[in-house]
Amino acid sequence: MSTFVLVHGAWHGGWSWRWVREQLESHGHRVFTPTMTGVGERTHLISTNITLDTVINDVIGTLKYEDLLDVVLVGHSFAGPVITGVADRIPSRIKQLIYLDAAILENGESMNSCISPEIVLERQRLADESSGGLSYPIPSAEKLGIIDLQQWDYIKRFLTPHPTSTYSSDLYIKGKPGDGFPCTYITCTDPLYEPLVWARRRAEQYGWTVLEIATGHDAMISSPEKTAQFFMEISD
């Protein structure tokens, strides 16, 4: 059996993996779902001081204090650079990496330096209007690839604004993303999440295994059974 640490994307929290966690645990796997500082049940800690280093250390803390080894580390969307940073800093605890429709940053890059300038400007405008620049407001169901309105009505209660400083701060790693680990990239294709198409191209350039899942960007919510099955097959 495998030990999974599932890391959520922007606006989400550890709660977003609950359905995938149930699937994995029903097959005997151990599953941990840390929440980053400033979102989810930790939204009360939001500040302009939260950087990529902060949220990387959130996940490192889970691995260290739960004393986890041979971890299958999964990152969704914004959590791509988070798991990259974790693997770079504590490689002895990591078995492999799975990027679920996730960003891939190299050393010295930030999320804002890699995504479309038009998206950066629009998000910053919304952040300025809603919170004085502190946080990006919750996106629409369409932007997260969720088409089931009943599903959306449920999960939007748990989404929280995301600290903008995590998008403007740089990632610092010693080598290339995923160096020394088996890496798999899973692209969500129905619909395709356009803001991260560039990340899939990077995964292909690195020679990683690239798979596709026919669901929206929030695969762990829109298709938890299929997502869990992918994770189990990859980790075998």
Image (cartoon, rainbow, N blue to C red):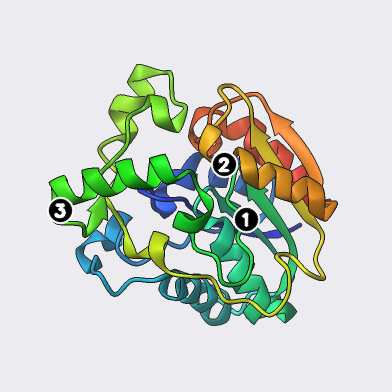
Q: Which of marks 3 and 1 is nearer the N terminus?
A: 1
Which mark identifies residue 131? 3
Q: What element carries label 2?
A: helix
Q: Name the residue under label 1.
A: 104
231 and 189: which is toward the camera: 189
In percent of the image, x 57 and y 34: which residue is there?
A: 224
Along the line of sight, the residue nearer the viewer: 205 or 15: 205
Q: Which amino acid does label 2 sit on?
A: Leu
The kind of residue tagged 3 is Ser
Contact? badges 2 and 3 (CB < 8 Å): no
- Residue in the picture at 56% in, 72% down: 108
Say the numbered circle drawn on residue 196: 2
Amino acid type shown at disc 1: Ile
Instruction: Check whether the beta carbons of the residues at disc 1 and disc 2 lie within 8 A of each other.
Output: no
Query: Where does the image place residue 91, in percent across and percent down from the top left?
Result: 71, 78
Question: Up-down: is 158 above or below 53?
Answer: above
Mark earlier in primary sequence (1, 2): 1
Is the residue 80 above or below the residue 87 in the image?
A: above
Q: Residue 78: x and y, percent?
A: 49, 53
* Secondary structure under the numbered disc 3 in the rendered image: helix
| Nearer to the camera, 193 or 121 | 121
Q: Tell me the residue at 35%/48% (across/down).
A: 11
**SS type, badge 1:** loop
